[in-house]
Amino acid sequence: MIQVSEKAKDKILEIKVTENRSENFHVRVGVKGGGCSGLMYDLAFDEELQPTDKLIEDKGIKLVVDKKSVLYLAGTTLDFSDGLNGKGFHFVNPNASRTCGCGESFSV
């Protein structure tokens, strides 16, 4: 469903240690309306599960996705870039027909 790249996995584990997160720590990913292309990615670190959450695990990383966002994120890879063109998490989404220049919003 959603995959985590090696770089993203390493960064998530680093955050878990530096922020002294509990074993219930997971990455919440989702999609919400907004941005210049219509939909925006949402990423947060969380320790609580909601009744409508779907739990996915890849490379030992727990990802939580709300039911609405699952359709938009199927086949997506969560990656991390630390290069000169920007540092941070980004999504490689095969469902996106158009993305904005900053890569934070998309349309299907």
Image: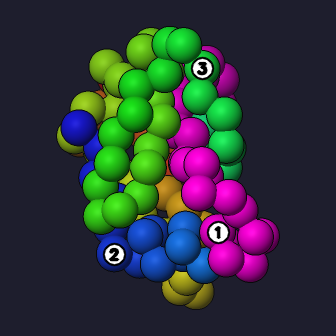
Magenta span covers which residues?
Answer: 15-41
Instruction: Give the quarter of the image for residue 21.
Output: bottom right
Please give left or right for residue 72 compared with residue 14 in the image. left
The residue lying furthest to the front in this view is 23
Relative depth, front residue between 6 and 107: 6
Ranked by sequence position, the earlier of labels 1 and 3 is 1
Q: Residues within 10 Å of mark 3 (few under 14, many from 20)?
A: few
Residue that extends furthest to the right in the rendered view of this protein: 19
Could you tell me residue 1's position as x and y percent? Answer: 23, 38
Nearer to the camera, 56 or 2: 56
> Residue flagged by tag 1: what amino acid is it?
Lys
- Provide the residue designation for mark 2: 6
Q: Which residue is mark 3?
A: 50
Magenta-drawn stretch contains 10 = no
**Which badge, 3 or 2, comes first in the chain's sequence?**
2
Say whether residue 34 is magenta.
yes
- Give, as a three-letter code, the residue at label 2: Glu
Q: CA distance from mark 3 to mark 2?
A: 27 Å
Distance from disc 1 to disc 2, alpha carbons, whole Å, reads 15 Å
Q: Is residue 74 left or right of residue 19?
A: left
Q: Which residue lies at the image location 67% right of the left edge and 44% below the top edge?
A: 46
Helix or strand or loop: what does disc 3 sit on?
loop
